Image: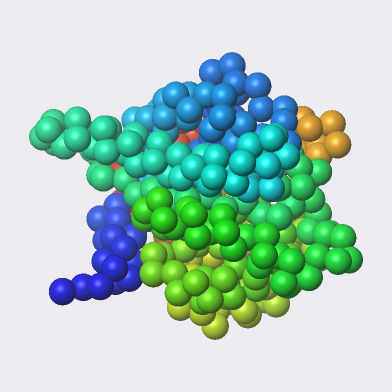
Amino acid sequence: MRNMKSEKKQMLHDLIQNTGGCAVTDGGFATQLETHGASINDPLWSAICLIKDPHLIKKVHLEYLEAGANILVTSSYQATIPGFLSKGLSIKEAESLLQRSVKLAIEARDSFWNSAKTNPGNKYRRALVAASIGSYGAYLADGSEYSGSYAPDVNLKKLKDFHRRRLQVLLEAGPDLLAFETIPNKLEAQACVELLEEQSVQIPSWICFTTVDGENAPSGESFKDCLEVINKSDKVDAVGINCAPPQFMENLIFKFKQLTKKAIIVYPNSGEVWDGKAKKWLPSKCFYGDDFGYHSTRWRDLGAKIVGGCCRTTPFSIQLISNALRENLK
Ligand SMILES: C[S+](C)CC[C@H](N)C(=O)O
Ligand SMILES: N[C@@H](CCS)C(=O)O
Ligand SMILES: [Zn+2]
C-alpha cells in the first residue's frame, strides 16, 4: 500500500498526466470576490472574507471549477494568526479560520465533483485543493511581496517562526497540496524549504516567486540563487512564478527549465501593477494580448506543467486556458 506521501504526490502527478501534461490552476481569487461586491481594502485583504463572507469564498471556488480549474487555491493567502489577533480574535478563532479556508475549498470541490461525475462525458476532473501560504510581505500588507526588501531584523528564524504555525494548522485541515505564493527573495524560499523538511510534510508543494523585472526575484537576487536551495529538497514538487505580468512568462519558463528539474508552474496576473501604498491596481505598463488561451498553450509547449492566472484574471481567463489546453493537446 502507498503511504500518504506517495498517495498525494501521485494525485498531483496523475492530474498533470491526465490533463495532457499541463494542469490548470484557478485565477484571481480576490479579484473575483471583489466582482461580487466584497470589500477587501483591509490588512487581511481577501482573507477578510473568511470572517465576513465565507459563502462568497465558496461561490468563487465553484466559479473557478465551472471554468475548468483543476486546482483550487484557498483563501488563506493573507490569513495569518497575527493578522487575525490584531482583529481582536483569539488564537483558537484564528486557527479555526485558517482551517475554514481549506474546508470551504474542499466542500466546493466535493459538491462540484459529486454533481459533475454523474454527467457522462463531462469535461471535468476531480480538482485538488492547494492551501495558499502568502509571503511575509503579503502579511505586512505594504506591497513588499513585490519588493522583497524586508526590514533588517527579518532573518531566517523570524521567517520560519512566522510561517510555522499557519503551515501546521493548514496541514491539519487536509489540503492536497501547499502553495507558497509571491515569495520575493531567497531567504524566504529557504525558510519555506526548511519548514517543509522540519515538519516532515508529506503532501506535495509548490513555491512561486514574483518578479518585477522579468529576470530576477523582486529582491534583485537571481533565480539561479533562489532555486539552489529549493532544488536540494524533495519536499518541493513545483517551482515557478505567480502574480507577475504575463509577458514575462515565456522567458522565465525557458530560464527555469535550465535551473531546475522540478515541475514548472506559472500563473501570471493581468499585467496590471499593484500600488502597495494606494492599495490599488495601476494599468499595465505594456500591452500584451489578453488571450490567456493562446498564451497558455505556449507556456505548456515551453514546459510548464501547471498554468493559471493570478490577480485581476477571472473565471473567463481560466475558461480560455482550460479550453485551449484541451483543444490543443500537445
Ligand atoms: C497580491 S497583493 C495585491 C495582496 C495585497 C497586499 N498584500 C496588501 O495587503 O496590500
Ligand atoms: N491567491 C491570492 C493572490 C496571490 S497574489 C488571492 O487572490 O487571494
Ligand atoms: Zn496575485
Residue at horizontal 66 percent and vertical 27 percent from the top: 40
Residue 57 seen: yes
Instruction: Specify the quadrant that holds the N terminus.
Output: bottom left
Residue that protrudes farthest toward the bottom in the picture:
232
**Quick check: 264 left or right of 188?**
left
Residue 298 seen: no
**Number of marks present in the image shown:** 0
* Residue 90: percent from left, percent from top: 61, 41
**Quick check: 96 left or right of 135?**
left
- When the figure is inspected, residue 244 is found, relative to residue 291, above or below; the finding is below
- In this picture the colour scheme is rainbow
Residue at horizontal 68 percent and vertical 42 percent from the top: 85
Q: Nearer the viewer, residue 156 or 275?
A: 156
Instruction: Specify the quadrant that holds the C terminus.
Output: bottom left
- When the figure is inspected, residue 48 is found, relative to residue 81, above or below; the finding is above
**Quick check: 64 left or right of 14?**
right
Residue that protrudes farthest toward the right in the picture:
152
* Residue 181: percent from left, percent from top: 60, 53
Residue 72 picture quarter? top left
* Residue 323: percent from left, percent from top: 35, 38
Q: Nearer the viewer, residue 51 or 18?
A: 51
Residue at horizontal 39 percent and vertical 41 percent from the top: 103
Residue at horizontal 65 percent and vertical 73 percent from the top: 190
Where does ligand 1 appear, by image quarter?
A: top right
